[in-house]
């Protein structure tokens, strides 16, 4: 009986450890994408981010909090998506306060972030989906042409191998370069909060 109790305790501890590992797997700046927006914002403010009012055109019932600060060494606006007063995703937009940004600036930033994500997530724990399958130097003009003339967008996505759901989506269009960090375990909450006003 003693061995059974010790075995059961060991199993519970290992399950608890595995759950703790999984809940901390989906993070933004080392902060798990979960819990109250207030606690999440406090942790970002402690890292040097500043709160600001929501940008115009943002729906306050879906996006609760806006911050600004440096992300990948670029000024960025950060907006939290919540459902049932719990953080479900983090949207990072670049160049939001600049009246003109060149295609080269957006493409350079996209490629820098893409390289950082590739270095961190290109392993057996994640699935990568990259729409940019080109030689960066040889095809830069083609990418600029496709974005500006044909309105094409490009993305780099990181999927959780266990659930098959997206965790990170980096995308670029002729107007923006943005990245979204999501908690794949909250995908249904994200979908319902985004479609609640449709």
Image (cartoon, rainbow, N blue to C red):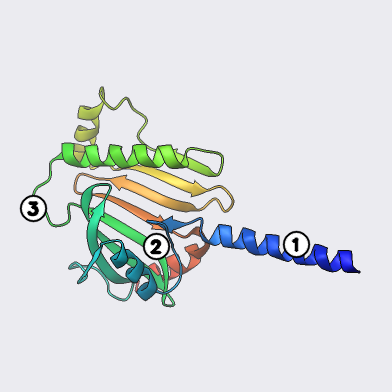
Residue 78, x across and y down, in percent: 27, 61
- Screen quadrant of the C terminus: bottom left
Q: Nearer the viewer, mark 1 or mark 2?
A: 1
Crowd tier of the residue under label 3, counting other residues whose Cα lies within 10 Å: few below 14, some 14–19, many 20 or above: few
Q: Please tell me whether mark 3 sits on a helix, a strand or a loop.
A: loop
Residue that extends furthest to the right in the rendered view of this protein: 1
- Marking on residue 89: 2
The answer to which of marks 2 and 3 sits earlier in the sequence is 2
The residue drawn where x is 23% and y is 29% is: 140
Residue at the image position 69 percent from the left and 60 percent from the top: 14
Give the quadrant of residue 193. Answer: bottom left
In this view, the residue farthest toward the top is 138
The part of the image, by quadrant, that contains residue 57 is: bottom left
Q: Mark 3 and 1 residues: CB-CB less than 8 Å, in contact? A: no
Residue for badge 1: 11
Residue marked by disc 3: 99
Q: Is 14 left, or right, of 19 in this rendering?
A: right
Q: Mark 3 or mark 1: name the one nearer the start of the chain.
A: 1
Q: Position of residue 176 (x, y in %)?
A: 22, 49
Q: Residue drawn at (51%, 42%), measured in percent from left and top?
A: 127
> Mark 1 or 2 closer to N-term?
1
| 190 in relation to 26, above or below | below
Q: Position of residue 124 (x, y in %)?
A: 56, 39
The residue closer to the viewer here, 114 or 130, is 114
Tell me the distance, in whole angstroms, between the alpha carbons under discs 1 and 2. 32 Å
The residue that appears at 33% across and 66% down in the rendered structure is 80
Q: Is residue 153 above or below residue 50?
A: above
Q: From this viewpoint, is residue 196 visible?
A: no
């Amino acid at each position: 009986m003693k061995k059974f109790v010790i075995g059961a305790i060991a199993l519970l501890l290992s399950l608890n450890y595995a759950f703790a590992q999984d809940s901390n797997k989906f993070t933004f700046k080392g902060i798990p994408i979960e819990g109250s927006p207030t606690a999440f914002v406090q942790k970002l403010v402690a890292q040097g981010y500043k709160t600001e009012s929501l940008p115009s055109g943002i729906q306050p019932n879906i996006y609760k909090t806006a911050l600004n600060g440096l992300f990948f060494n670029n000024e960025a606006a950060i907006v939290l998506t919540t459902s049932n007063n719990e953080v479900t995703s983090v949207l990072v937009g670049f160049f939001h306060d600049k009246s003109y940004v060149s295609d080269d600036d957006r493409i350079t930033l996209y490629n820098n972030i893409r390289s950082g994500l590739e270095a961190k997530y290109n392993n057996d724990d994640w699935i990568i989906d990259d729409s940019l399958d080109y030689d960066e130097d040889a095809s830069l003009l083609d990418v600029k042409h496709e974005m500006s003339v044909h309105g094409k967008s490009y993305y780099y996505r990181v999927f959780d191998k266990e659930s098959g759901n997206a965790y990170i989506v980096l995308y670029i269009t002729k107007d923006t370069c943005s990245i979204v960090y999501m908690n794949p375990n909250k995908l249904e909450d994200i979908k319902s909060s985004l479609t609640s006003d449709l």
